[in-house]
Image: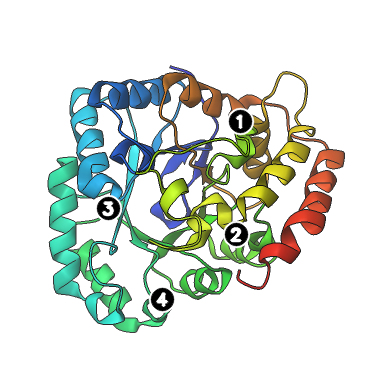
Amino acid sequence: MIVMEQRELGRTGRNVSVVGQGTWQLGGDWGEVREADAFDVLDAAVGAGVTFFDTADVYGDGRSEQLIGRYLKERPDAGVLVATKMGRRAEQVPENYVLDNFRTWNDRSRTNLGVETLDLVQLHCPPTAVYSSDEVYDALDTLVAEQRIAAYGVSVETCAEALTAIARPGVASVQIILNPFRLKPLDEVLPAARAAGVGIVARVPLASGLLSGKYTADTVFAPEDHRTYNRHGEAFDQGETFSGIEYGTGLAAAAEFAGFAPEGATPAQTALRWIIQQPGVTSVIPGARSVEQTRANAAAAVLDPLPQSALDAVRDLYDRRIRAAVHDRW
């Protein structure tokens, strides 16, 4: 097993690897993944020093959680903190975010993962009003008191939602979209989280694969892949797919970004390295569907920090190609 840099995950009091493992892909929402292949991916992640898995109860309607649970039952020595998410299996109205529902959702995730106490549960991009509800945080505190969960956090769509959650004393972590095409969290969210001792988990770090530089205008994604059916927010928030960027705009920006990669590093690794070195980031959670992708993602943790010239180039690229196209919606 490789030893990777560990950072404290906010108010959980536990350390996690700077590169974690996102497992949305393993649920089947990016195309079918065989169980044996999923186990190989998780095993490769642990072997590369990853100690943080991120999942959700809706990834494959629980399949991702179940796979992680079965894998960790075989590898109790893996030392992995598992963060799951809840809330998206119900109608998205604030009235559904109540203690009884939390207990029901919690029971299902505990069964899927095969544990009595979940390490970290995150509200999964709920309606904006939920982040301001005293009753919601009281209910989450009750789950902690009942030892159903060890800690709780939130996954957000907007910076305003993140800032609202960070102000709550029980929130351990905030998961937010952050990548070289999504810079707005750098302005207020990361500084506020650092000041409050809240962990930041960076999701969608490769803009749904755009930043890998592997896609072209002729690339065809499977019908069950959200990059086919959610390009305009048809199924859930558009920001979850290509970071909300129009595909052609993203391709052009990705081609330019690829030129920033240092010798020996891929564009994807460069994007992950950029995220890792942003002050306030705890862990970045790229997904993977193969052992090779998993190991390549983890290798970003040992790259030399990007020079200031590369950081400036990313900012310039964002200002010229991305900001005008999506700033108003963000």
73 vs 130, left or right, is: left
Looking at the rendered structure, which numbered label has been put on residue 121? none
Give the spatial CA distance, label 4 vs label 3: 20 Å
Residue matched to label 4: 131
**Of the residues tagged 3 and 2, which is closer to the observer?**
3
Of the numbered discs 4 and 1, the one sitting upstream in the chain is 4
Residue at (57, 46) in percent of width and height: 207
**Of the residues tagged 4 and 1, which is closer to the observer?**
1
192 vs 62, left or right, is: right
Label 3: few (<14), some or many (≥20) within 10 Å? many
Residue matched to label 2: 194
Residue matched to label 3: 58
159 vs 279, left or right, is: left
Disc 3 marks which amino acid? Answer: Val
**Of the residues tagged 3 and 1, which is closer to the observer?**
1
Can residue 179 be seen from the camera position used here? no
Do labels 2 and 1 touch, CB within 8 Å? no
- Residue 272's place in the image compared with 140, above or below, is above
Label 2: few (<14), some or many (≥20) within 10 Å? some
Give the spatial CA distance, label 3 vs label 2: 30 Å
